[in-house]
Amino acid sequence: MESISVSCDDKLKITKRLSKFNVDYIEAGWPGSNPKDEEFFARAQSELDVETFSKLVAFGSTRRKGILAKDDKQIGTLVDSMAPTVCIVAKAHLWQVTDIIRADPEENLEMIRDSVSYLVEQGRTVMVDLEHFFDGYRFDKEYTLKCCQAAVDGGAEVLVMCDTNGGSMTWEIDQITKDTLSKFDKTTFGIHCHNDCGLAVANSLISVQSGVGLIQGTINGIGERTGNADLCSIVPSLALHCGCEQMTCKDNLDEITSLSRFLDETLNRSPDGSAPYVGNSAFAHKGGLHVAALERSPDSYQHVEPSKVGNQLRVLISELSGRQNIMGRIKKLDLDLGEHDDNFVAERALVILDRVKKLESMGYTFEGADASVELMILHSTQGYCPPFQVLDYTAQVYDTNVDSASRVMSKMENNGPGREDAMGIPRHNLARATVKVRVTDDPNHPDDQDFLDILEVSEGNGPVDALANALQKALAPSHPELQNLQLIDYKVRILDPESATQAATRVMIEFKDVKTNMKWTTVSVDRNIISASLNALVDGFEYALKEVVASCVMEDIFGNDPHP
């Protein structure tokens, strides 16, 4: 898959995590193809525990034409890897044999038989990936079955039928699998599907019903082109919908969401929020009717209990929400609602909902900004007092070279090497921000006041960066926990591009507490992009402090307008 590269250290970490999840086999690389995989298998012998090492599979291919397996260097690296199981790829499509590798069909059968036989003699368990199996079966069924027989004659324990090009339909997988297995009733077959038609998961599941005993797949479906079969969909479906009781990893099913996110984090990928079972939106509900029904029974709009796969139900706030969405969020926050009865709270929740709908009509979106929703509710709750208030701010950007053709190059030349960011863009502290904040919980405030006003100035790589630096600098003395705060994503969207430079801008900022790894997102909309950014920044900083602020008593439970 594009933009995916894993270091040897990361591969070892991933292997250990997969072993902990208790998968049966871990295909760890092709030791004969690159130094990184050779290093992995060398280090694995001393850095992996016995159980984890026993799951390793070394990948390779059949021997080359015109040479015996015992003399093939690539086959030798598979043996030298010391992996207890070896998986070799073999051509099972007559046209691929004659026109792509340009081998005699009988020689290809001998390449399969000889390679498997030699590896078995070396004490290895052998799987054979029958490449282009389903396409080959449709092209020349008899030859494809001869390839199967050659692997069986050599002593292979598992024959893996590969939908290499990903173009097979589910009913074709079902029919061909049943037909093939009927001719090899004493051999274990597996399936290897690619997702070029979006059917890799469905094809893998139907093959189980058709009799296969092993599924090859990847976490999050990572793989060539559009990906491989996604085990994060296959494993839960087999366990929860297909009644497969013999899967070794079934008892660890509640860890599959964390496994999915661990892999994305290790590979520096953004998780797929819409992924079945493990995605952030897999059990997210927005429609008011849905949420009202969920209050009565969680089974009304979800096919499994989220906790079974380590995920959680989420109630989204949007213009499609009903009052129950807000009520559910209030209950989840476990807020002090005073002496008021449920009817009163429900009425006030409706006021908050109306505010949400009005804001979304202006361009706000709260589906991905839970922190802004919680702050809106908190500002309407007895006992909550904002930890700080921004009284005023300024942001300045200054430059000396405004020639569009030469500006970037001249800055790079003036700054010298090492002054670029990760994207190769020159870094310059050419923005300065001043922020004045009022802090309500500072030990240094004057005796005759309940607050302390602080004025700070900071520079940054652009106005938003400078504002964030100034805000953190002003608040850190009173709230040192903000030193753990990082801004990890900043998104800007123009809502009405036809308005050109007067267009409304939506800003979403994602924050992370590096100490707890907790993440949250805030949103703001304004025709001034700097104002929108500052409002989202302020919400993010306030959310980071919501658990530690001193409480204060407001005039009544919903005395203030809900905070946008």
Image: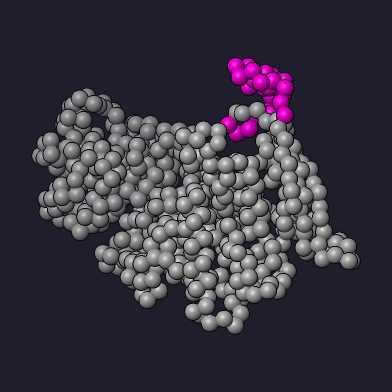
Residue 45 seen by the camera: no
The secondary structure that most of the magenta stretch takes on is: loop
Residue 91 seen by the camera: yes
Left or right side of 363 for 455: right
Question: Is 418 covered by the magenta stretch?
Answer: yes
Q: Identify which residue is drawn at 66% across, 21% down.
A: 402
Q: Identify which residue is drawn at 74% across, 52% down.
A: 391
Left or right side of 290 for 202: left
Of residues 4 and 303, which is closer to you in this image? 303
| The quadrant where residue 77 appears | top left
Left or right side of 97 for 68: right
Q: Identify which residue is drawn at 82% across, 59% down.
A: 452
Q: Identify which residue is drawn at 72% across, 29% down.
A: 398
Of residues 411 and 191, which is closer to you in this image? 411
Residue 539 position, x and y percent, is: 63, 55
Quarter of the picture holding the C terminus = bottom right
Residue 536 position, x and y percent, is: 61, 50
Of residues 260 and 534, which is closer to you in this image? 534
Question: Magenta residues, as a range?
Answer: 398-423
